[in-house]
Image: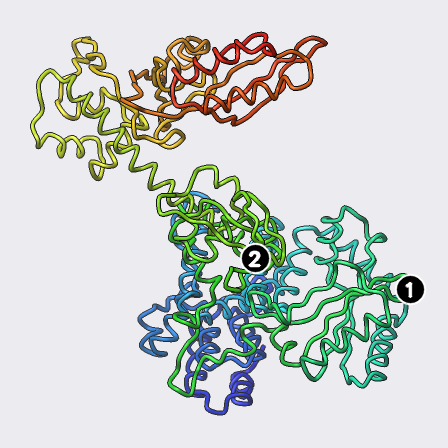
Amino acid sequence: MLRQYELVDRVLDYDPDADEALLNRAYVFSMQAHGSQKRASGDPYFSHPIEVAGILTDLHLDDETIATAILHDTIEDTVATPEEITRLFGASVARLVDGVTKLSKIEAQTENERAAENLRKFLLAMSDDIRVLLVKLADRLHNMRTLHHIAKPEKRRRIAKETMDIYAPLAERIGMYEFMREMQTLAFEQIEPEASESINRRLEQLKDGDGNRIAKIASGLKLVLSRAGIEAEVAGREKHPYSIFRKMSERHINFEQLSDVMAFRAIVPTEADCYAALGIIHQRWPMVPGRFKDYISTPKRNGYRSLHTSVIHADNARIEIQIRTEAMHAQAEFGLAAHWAYKQKSGGQTIGGGEHQVSWIRDLVEILDTAESPEELLEHTRMAMYADRIFAFTPKGELIQLPKGATPIDFAYAVHTDLGDQAVGAKIDGRVVPLSTVIENGNQVQILRSKGQSPQPHWLNVATTGKALAAIRRHLRHKERVEQEALGRTLFDDIASRLPAPIGPDATEPALKRLKFADEGALMVAIARRTVSDEQVMEALMPGSTGADLGHAVAPQSSAISIKGLTPGVAYDLATCCHPVPGDRIVGLRRPDAGIEVHAIDCRVLAELAERTENETDWVDVAWGEKTEGAVARISVMVKNEPGSLGVVASIIGTHMANIINLRLDTRDTSFHTNEIDVEVHDIQQLMRLMAGLRAADAVNTVERV
């Protein structure tokens, strides 16, 4: 453990103007606060915050950050209070300590809820000042280094998985690859102990078998570059075990089939030398196609810059080579911490808000604002931090980084939330494409927009980024609540009309209290989703009105409920067993905590459904409403088994201004084959005309509605 004077001297070596008194106060306060507390290893607990501070001195961070590291566990694990930290060390240090502190006392029902709340507070604090992240990463790194002292295997695995899911990707996102690699290696040992041991054993065998092969290859690379007039520092290493395991898993190969186990780094004086060195290496050894990446001209989102290539060296061995300058190397190893000073000569300006805020952190904060559940927050946050990146360009040449597999919807939301909400189509490299098209590296993407557009439910199956999914879900949740409130209010009016006497304008407020709802909107949603029954609402509005004590039946529904203006799939669902369309006689099925499911009155499964769910089913009389338009009908068309017959069917459907949504070949024999076709029509009249037109065609044998 670092002694007090050793820690202070480390800071003064790189920052002579550091506040020595602040560091000394923090050291003494933390030591006294933690007192006789012990870690799982048996060491004094106080050794942990001091080691965390030591890790951060290697990054040359400012005195406030080092003091925060020393104090970061005092509020959580001792009797120290935030007010005490503020009084002794200032508001800035107190704010940082609070940002790092976990919400250990939060009452949550599940592990996901605890993890989500801890992550929520941490990300918000990080968005305000990025130093919170640096302290937290150093804290987690030291905890991982001592994880083996924890006795319970399940606890070690839980911490390791959290590290792999959250903290290693966070380190990668700010370019701190040394932190990321060590965290992944240590977590991998706990999550996949057998695989980790096997890969480490094979790496040792590789070293023993090849002797100093890595040193020889590095020396040869340096000699080739030197002869061409480029002085380079070349170092080599085996890839770390988790990286090897991931490649084996992705490519479905074993260790012996993995060819690029070795990686080399050439550090050259200038950016021009990077490209010159690349040309020399490619002249000397054949490159592996598809493995060259230029992160100098197009840096990663975290600022990482380097040239990557793989070549086939002696004995057909593939080796990976990274070429960069000294400044790029510092950025690559320690990322954001390598070049952002937090105590500016102009007056203590900190990184976090305003123009200095990292864009992906803004995305995470936006996800915080839109996530509805702990699971959704964790899912979207991991999406925002994981995945390999591709580069795409706006028509004006702005570079947008996205995960592999991203679509124009993801691109639109990456540019701006409003653009995503209003997207109606896209052009990729000048060609109009569907919004579901996967963007390739280097594509130019133009989003076509309309102010009348809004996010659609099926976009959830197309979007891949956490930011896009969070924004779409937020809009759909808002739309669903608005429509369910409207539907609930209509149902409420019908319920009120069935009471023995009209209710006064003030009857709703006491009813809300009896039913324990915060406001009218919540009550209307509950009625629409049947989390409260009609009888309960009637009894709350007018006690004794249901006549339950006297055995009276509740009055039946007085009028049909119109679903005009509501969106299928949001406030109600059209049953897929009967595919009702406007003009059909319909009935609504209400189940607890679900939207109304609309069936045709002659649906063949209706009676069976009612019998199976008798105790929890409520039927409601619904109507399309005047001039309601648009639904999907399913028809079964038997056509002659001859060339062109399906084309005739498609042509007739098009002539009747209907749109084919889906087509499935059901049965086929030597004379006929039957197709089930989903067609989008305005109403029942259009569907009947379409079916009559199909029956008149010579190629069609029969047409039935399914």
Residue 511, disc:
none
Identify whether 400 is placed above or below 512.
Answer: below
* Any part of residue 57 in sight: yes
On the image, numbered disc 1 is attached to which residue?
A: 209
Residue found 83% across the figure and 62% down from its top: 318
Instruction: Determine the secondary structure under disc 2.
Output: loop
Mark yes or no: residue 115 visible. no
Rounded to the nearest whole Å, what is the CA distance between mark 2 and mark 1?
A: 49 Å
The residue nearer to you, when weighing 7 against 541, is 541
> Which quarter of the figure has residue 296?
bottom right
Q: Looking at the image, is mark 2 or mark 1 earlier in the sequence?
A: 1
Type of the residue with mark 1: Gly
Q: Residue at x 54, y 75 (%)?
A: 337
Residue 444: assigned label: 2
Q: Residue at x 55, y 26 (%)?
A: 662
Up-down relation of residue 684 to residue 161 (above or below): above
Measuring 72% from the left and 67% from the top, which residue is drawn there? 308
Q: Residues within 10 Å of mark 2 (few under 14, many from 20)?
A: many
Coordinates of residue 638 in the picture (x, y in percent): 60, 11
Foreground: disc 2 or disc 1: 2
Q: Secondary structure at mark 1?
A: helix
Between 120 and 235, the residue placed more toward the observer is 235
Residue 146: image x %, image y %?
Answer: 61, 64
Query: In the figure, 81 relative to 116: above or below?
Result: below
Q: Which x, y percent locates residue 497?
A: 15, 19
In which image quadrant can residue 28 be found? bottom left
- Estimate the x, y position of residue 286 in percent, counting from the top left: 85, 65
Dot 2 amino acid type? Gln
**544 relative to 301 in the view: left or right:** left
Q: Residue furthest bottom?
A: 16
